Image: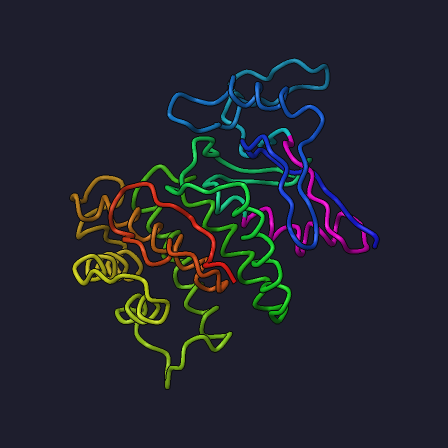
Protein backbone atom coordinates (compact mmCIF):
# COMPACT_ATOMS: atom_id res chain seq x y z
CA UNK A 1 0.00 0.00 0.00
CA UNK A 2 1.23 3.47 -0.82
CA UNK A 3 1.88 5.91 1.99
CA UNK A 4 2.16 9.63 2.48
CA UNK A 5 4.12 11.31 5.23
CA UNK A 6 4.85 14.66 6.77
CA UNK A 7 7.03 15.89 9.62
CA UNK A 8 5.62 17.86 12.55
CA UNK A 9 6.68 19.20 15.93
CA UNK A 10 7.60 19.87 18.48
CA UNK A 11 6.51 16.87 20.56
CA UNK A 12 8.72 16.09 23.54
CA UNK A 13 8.29 12.33 23.27
CA UNK A 14 11.43 10.39 22.28
CA UNK A 15 9.61 7.27 21.09
CA UNK A 16 8.00 6.01 17.89
CA UNK A 17 4.25 5.44 17.86
CA UNK A 18 2.62 2.57 15.99
CA UNK A 19 -1.07 2.53 15.22
CA UNK A 20 -3.47 0.90 12.78
CA UNK A 21 -3.26 2.86 9.55
CA UNK A 22 0.17 4.36 9.97
CA UNK A 23 3.16 5.10 12.16
CA UNK A 24 5.00 7.99 13.76
CA UNK A 25 8.79 7.93 13.91
CA UNK A 26 11.45 10.23 15.32
CA UNK A 27 13.20 12.53 12.87
CA UNK A 28 16.95 11.80 12.50
CA UNK A 29 17.99 14.95 14.37
CA UNK A 30 15.45 14.67 17.17
CA UNK A 31 18.11 15.17 19.85
CA UNK A 32 19.31 18.39 18.26
CA UNK A 33 15.75 19.70 17.97
CA UNK A 34 15.04 18.74 21.58
CA UNK A 35 18.15 20.55 22.77
CA UNK A 36 17.13 23.69 20.84
CA UNK A 37 13.63 23.66 22.32
CA UNK A 38 15.02 23.09 25.83
CA UNK A 39 17.45 26.00 25.42
CA UNK A 40 14.74 28.41 24.29
CA UNK A 41 11.93 27.35 26.63
CA UNK A 42 11.13 29.86 29.36
CA UNK A 43 11.28 28.80 33.00
CA UNK A 44 7.46 28.92 33.06
CA UNK A 45 7.36 25.96 30.65
CA UNK A 46 6.41 27.87 27.50
CA UNK A 47 8.27 28.41 24.25
CA UNK A 48 7.67 32.04 23.25
CA UNK A 49 7.91 33.74 19.84
CA UNK A 50 11.33 35.29 19.19
CA UNK A 51 11.91 39.00 18.72
CA UNK A 52 11.57 40.26 15.15
CA UNK A 53 12.40 43.49 13.34
CA UNK A 54 12.02 45.13 9.97
CA UNK A 55 15.09 45.55 7.76
CA UNK A 56 15.95 47.86 4.90
CA UNK A 57 17.18 46.68 1.48
CA UNK A 58 20.71 46.29 2.80
CA UNK A 59 19.55 44.03 5.62
CA UNK A 60 20.09 46.58 8.38
CA UNK A 61 17.57 46.78 11.19
CA UNK A 62 15.12 49.66 10.91
CA UNK A 63 15.10 51.63 14.18
CA UNK A 64 12.11 51.16 16.49
CA UNK A 65 10.88 48.11 14.58
CA UNK A 66 11.79 45.46 17.18
CA UNK A 67 8.76 43.51 18.42
CA UNK A 68 7.72 39.97 19.34
CA UNK A 69 7.12 37.93 16.22
CA UNK A 70 3.47 37.35 15.36
CA UNK A 71 4.29 33.96 13.82
CA UNK A 72 7.17 31.58 14.39
CA UNK A 73 8.23 28.04 13.59
CA UNK A 74 9.36 25.11 15.71
CA UNK A 75 11.72 22.33 14.63
CA UNK A 76 10.11 19.02 13.63
CA UNK A 77 10.43 16.14 16.06
CA UNK A 78 8.46 13.32 14.41
CA UNK A 79 7.42 12.07 11.00
CA UNK A 80 3.81 10.95 10.46
CA UNK A 81 3.26 8.30 7.78
CA UNK A 82 -0.22 7.10 6.78
CA UNK A 83 -1.08 4.04 4.73
CA UNK A 84 -2.88 5.93 2.01
CA UNK A 85 -1.92 7.36 -1.38
CA UNK A 86 -1.44 11.03 -2.01
CA UNK A 87 0.85 13.94 -1.30
CA UNK A 88 1.55 15.64 2.02
CA UNK A 89 -0.99 18.40 1.32
CA UNK A 90 -4.14 16.22 1.53
CA UNK A 91 -2.59 14.52 4.57
CA UNK A 92 -2.01 17.88 6.23
CA UNK A 93 -5.56 19.00 5.53
CA UNK A 94 -7.24 15.72 6.44
CA UNK A 95 -6.28 12.75 8.63
CA UNK A 96 -2.79 14.09 9.29
CA UNK A 97 -4.17 17.28 10.81
CA UNK A 98 -6.60 15.28 12.92
CA UNK A 99 -3.83 13.03 14.25
CA UNK A 100 -1.29 15.72 15.15
CA UNK A 101 -3.91 17.83 16.92
CA UNK A 102 -5.14 14.68 18.70
CA UNK A 103 -1.57 14.12 19.86
CA UNK A 104 -1.43 17.77 20.98
CA UNK A 105 -4.54 17.10 23.06
CA UNK A 106 -3.11 13.93 24.56
CA UNK A 107 0.25 15.46 25.48
CA UNK A 108 -1.06 18.89 26.44
CA UNK A 109 0.88 20.92 23.90
CA UNK A 110 0.49 22.55 20.47
CA UNK A 111 1.76 20.90 17.30
CA UNK A 112 2.20 22.04 13.70
CA UNK A 113 3.55 20.63 10.47
CA UNK A 114 7.12 21.35 9.41
CA UNK A 115 7.50 24.69 7.61
CA UNK A 116 4.04 25.83 8.73
CA UNK A 117 3.71 28.68 11.20
CA UNK A 118 2.35 28.91 14.72
CA UNK A 119 1.30 31.97 16.72
CA UNK A 120 1.92 32.78 20.36
CA UNK A 121 3.38 30.68 23.12
CA UNK A 122 3.59 26.89 23.09
CA UNK A 123 3.42 24.78 26.25
CA UNK A 124 6.42 22.46 26.35
CA UNK A 125 5.62 21.40 29.90
CA UNK A 126 2.45 19.27 29.38
CA UNK A 127 -0.84 21.06 30.07
CA UNK A 128 -2.83 17.83 30.39
CA UNK A 129 -2.77 16.12 33.77
CA UNK A 130 -2.68 12.49 32.66
CA UNK A 131 -0.31 9.54 32.71
CA UNK A 132 -0.27 7.47 29.54
CA UNK A 133 1.72 4.36 28.58
CA UNK A 134 3.27 3.93 25.13
CA UNK A 135 0.85 1.10 24.31
CA UNK A 136 -2.14 3.26 25.18
CA UNK A 137 -0.90 6.10 22.95
CA UNK A 138 -0.94 3.78 19.92
CA UNK A 139 -4.24 2.20 20.92
CA UNK A 140 -5.89 5.60 21.35
CA UNK A 141 -4.69 6.77 17.93
CA UNK A 142 -5.84 3.52 16.27
CA UNK A 143 -9.31 3.72 17.78
CA UNK A 144 -9.69 7.45 17.18
CA UNK A 145 -8.60 7.33 13.53
CA UNK A 146 -10.97 4.43 12.85
CA UNK A 147 -13.84 6.35 14.45
CA UNK A 148 -12.97 9.63 12.71
CA UNK A 149 -12.83 7.87 9.31
CA UNK A 150 -16.37 6.58 9.84
CA UNK A 151 -17.83 10.07 10.30
CA UNK A 152 -19.17 12.47 7.63
CA UNK A 153 -16.66 15.00 6.30
CA UNK A 154 -18.34 17.89 8.13
CA UNK A 155 -18.02 16.11 11.49
CA UNK A 156 -14.41 15.17 10.73
CA UNK A 157 -13.57 18.80 10.06
CA UNK A 158 -15.41 19.94 13.18
CA UNK A 159 -13.50 17.60 15.49
CA UNK A 160 -10.15 18.53 13.91
CA UNK A 161 -10.97 22.21 14.45
CA UNK A 162 -12.07 21.52 18.02
CA UNK A 163 -8.76 19.82 18.77
CA UNK A 164 -6.84 22.69 17.17
CA UNK A 165 -8.77 25.28 19.19
CA UNK A 166 -8.46 23.23 22.38
CA UNK A 167 -4.67 23.27 22.07
CA UNK A 168 -4.79 27.08 21.77
CA UNK A 169 -6.45 27.57 25.17
CA UNK A 170 -3.09 27.80 26.95
CA UNK A 171 -1.91 30.40 24.43
CA UNK A 172 -3.85 33.10 26.28
CA UNK A 173 -2.40 34.68 29.45
CA UNK A 174 -5.69 35.87 30.98
CA UNK A 175 -8.26 33.54 32.54
CA UNK A 176 -11.16 35.25 30.78
CA UNK A 177 -9.48 34.66 27.41
CA UNK A 178 -8.83 31.02 28.27
CA UNK A 179 -12.43 30.69 29.41
CA UNK A 180 -13.82 32.19 26.18
CA UNK A 181 -11.73 29.84 24.06
CA UNK A 182 -12.56 26.80 26.20
CA UNK A 183 -16.27 27.58 25.99
CA UNK A 184 -16.07 27.74 22.20
CA UNK A 185 -14.54 24.28 22.29
CA UNK A 186 -17.21 23.00 24.67
CA UNK A 187 -20.02 24.42 22.55
CA UNK A 188 -18.44 22.81 19.48
CA UNK A 189 -18.41 19.49 21.35
CA UNK A 190 -22.13 19.87 21.96
CA UNK A 191 -22.71 20.63 18.27
CA UNK A 192 -20.66 17.60 17.20
CA UNK A 193 -22.51 15.28 19.59
CA UNK A 194 -25.81 16.66 18.28
CA UNK A 195 -24.84 16.34 14.61
CA UNK A 196 -23.75 12.73 15.13
CA UNK A 197 -27.01 11.98 16.98
CA UNK A 198 -25.22 10.98 20.14
CA UNK A 199 -27.81 13.02 22.03
CA UNK A 200 -31.49 12.15 21.70
CA UNK A 201 -32.90 15.63 22.27
CA UNK A 202 -36.35 16.86 21.21
CA UNK A 203 -34.93 20.38 20.77
CA UNK A 204 -31.74 22.36 21.25
CA UNK A 205 -31.24 22.86 25.00
CA UNK A 206 -30.34 26.29 26.44
CA UNK A 207 -26.75 26.86 27.44
CA UNK A 208 -27.52 26.37 31.12
CA UNK A 209 -28.45 22.75 30.34
CA UNK A 210 -25.73 21.81 27.85
CA UNK A 211 -22.99 20.90 30.32
CA UNK A 212 -25.41 18.82 32.37
CA UNK A 213 -26.75 17.10 29.23
CA UNK A 214 -23.33 16.10 27.92
CA UNK A 215 -22.07 14.98 31.31
CA UNK A 216 -25.10 12.78 31.90
CA UNK A 217 -24.89 11.23 28.44
CA UNK A 218 -21.18 10.37 28.71
CA UNK A 219 -21.34 9.50 32.43
CA UNK A 220 -19.02 12.35 33.36
CA UNK A 221 -19.35 13.48 37.01
CA UNK A 222 -21.48 16.53 37.75
CA UNK A 223 -20.86 19.47 40.07
CA UNK A 224 -23.88 21.79 40.19
CA UNK A 225 -21.99 24.72 41.76
CA UNK A 226 -19.18 24.62 39.20
CA UNK A 227 -21.64 24.31 36.30
CA UNK A 228 -23.65 27.26 37.62
CA UNK A 229 -20.49 29.38 37.87
CA UNK A 230 -19.43 28.49 34.31
CA UNK A 231 -22.84 29.36 32.87
CA UNK A 232 -22.96 32.63 34.83
CA UNK A 233 -19.50 33.65 33.63
CA UNK A 234 -20.34 32.67 30.05
CA UNK A 235 -23.51 34.76 29.97
CA UNK A 236 -21.83 37.80 31.47
CA UNK A 237 -18.80 37.63 29.18
CA UNK A 238 -20.56 36.81 25.91
CA UNK A 239 -23.62 39.03 26.34
CA UNK A 240 -22.42 41.94 28.47
CA UNK A 241 -18.58 41.95 28.13
CA UNK A 242 -18.40 41.45 31.89
CA UNK A 243 -15.98 39.08 33.57
CA UNK A 244 -17.40 38.03 36.91
CA UNK A 245 -19.35 41.28 37.01
CA UNK A 246 -16.31 43.43 36.32
CA UNK A 247 -13.85 44.34 33.59
CA UNK A 248 -11.82 41.66 31.82
CA UNK A 249 -8.10 41.79 32.71
CA UNK A 250 -8.77 43.39 36.08
CA UNK A 251 -11.60 41.73 38.01
CA UNK A 252 -12.59 38.29 39.23
CA UNK A 253 -12.41 36.04 42.27
CA UNK A 254 -11.26 32.50 42.98
CA UNK A 255 -14.36 31.04 41.34
CA UNK A 256 -13.73 32.81 38.04
CA UNK A 257 -9.99 32.15 38.24
CA UNK A 258 -10.54 28.40 38.33
CA UNK A 259 -13.53 28.30 35.98
CA UNK A 260 -11.42 28.39 32.81
CA UNK A 261 -9.29 25.50 34.04
CA UNK A 262 -12.33 23.49 35.11
CA UNK A 263 -13.91 23.98 31.69
CA UNK A 264 -10.71 22.97 29.91
CA UNK A 265 -10.52 19.81 32.01
CA UNK A 266 -14.14 19.02 31.13
CA UNK A 267 -13.26 19.35 27.43
CA UNK A 268 -10.34 16.99 27.99
CA UNK A 269 -12.81 14.32 29.09
CA UNK A 270 -15.38 15.04 26.40
CA UNK A 271 -12.91 14.43 23.58
CA UNK A 272 -12.24 10.71 24.22
CA UNK A 273 -15.89 10.28 25.22
CA UNK A 274 -17.13 11.54 21.84
CA UNK A 275 -14.61 9.29 20.10
CA UNK A 276 -16.04 6.33 21.99
CA UNK A 277 -12.77 5.50 23.71
CA UNK A 278 -13.92 3.83 26.92
CA UNK A 279 -11.14 4.99 29.21
CA UNK A 280 -12.04 5.38 32.91
CA UNK A 281 -10.41 8.81 32.66
CA UNK A 282 -13.69 10.14 31.25
CA UNK A 283 -15.41 9.44 34.58
CA UNK A 284 -12.82 11.26 36.71
CA UNK A 285 -13.42 14.55 38.53
CA UNK A 286 -12.80 17.52 36.23
CA UNK A 287 -13.11 20.31 38.83
CA UNK A 288 -10.02 19.30 40.79
CA UNK A 289 -6.33 19.57 40.03
CA UNK A 290 -4.42 16.32 39.84
CA UNK A 291 -2.83 13.68 37.67
CA UNK A 292 -5.04 10.91 36.29
CA UNK A 293 -4.29 7.67 34.50
CA UNK A 294 -5.37 7.62 30.86
CA UNK A 295 -5.97 3.89 30.73
CA UNK A 296 -7.05 1.88 27.72
CA UNK A 297 -10.50 0.31 27.57
CA UNK A 298 -11.11 -3.03 29.23
CA UNK A 299 -9.59 -5.96 27.33
CA UNK A 300 -11.83 -7.17 24.52
Q: Is residue 98 magenta?
A: yes
Residue 171 lies, with reference to residue 272, above or below; the image says above
Q: Residue at x 65, y 45 (%)?
A: 18
Number of numbered discs: 0
Q: Residue at x 45, y 59 (%)?
A: 298
Q: Is residue 242 left or right of residue 264?
A: left
Q: Is residue 44 left or right of residue 63?
A: left
Q: Is residue 224 left or right of residue 281?
A: left
Residue 248 lies, with reference to residue 226, above or below; the image says above
Query: How far from the left and from the top, in percent, is residue 168?
Result: 46, 45
Query: How far from the left and from the top, in percent, is residue 216?
Result: 31, 70
Residue, far right: 2
Query: How far from the left and from the top, in percent, is residue 98?
Result: 60, 53
Q: Is residue 115 left or right of residue 11?
A: right
Q: Residue at x 68, y 45 (%)?
A: 23
Region rendered in magenta: 76-102
Quarter of the image for the N terminus: give it: bottom right
Amino acid sequence: MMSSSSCFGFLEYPYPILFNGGAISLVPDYERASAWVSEHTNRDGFLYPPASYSADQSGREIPHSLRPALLHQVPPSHDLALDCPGTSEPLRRGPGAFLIHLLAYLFGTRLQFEEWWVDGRIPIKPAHGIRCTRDVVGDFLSHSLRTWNSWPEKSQRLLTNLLFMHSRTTLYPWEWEQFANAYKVFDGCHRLATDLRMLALPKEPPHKERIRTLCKHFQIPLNADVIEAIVRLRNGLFHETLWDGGQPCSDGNNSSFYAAHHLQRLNQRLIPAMLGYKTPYVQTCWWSIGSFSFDSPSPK
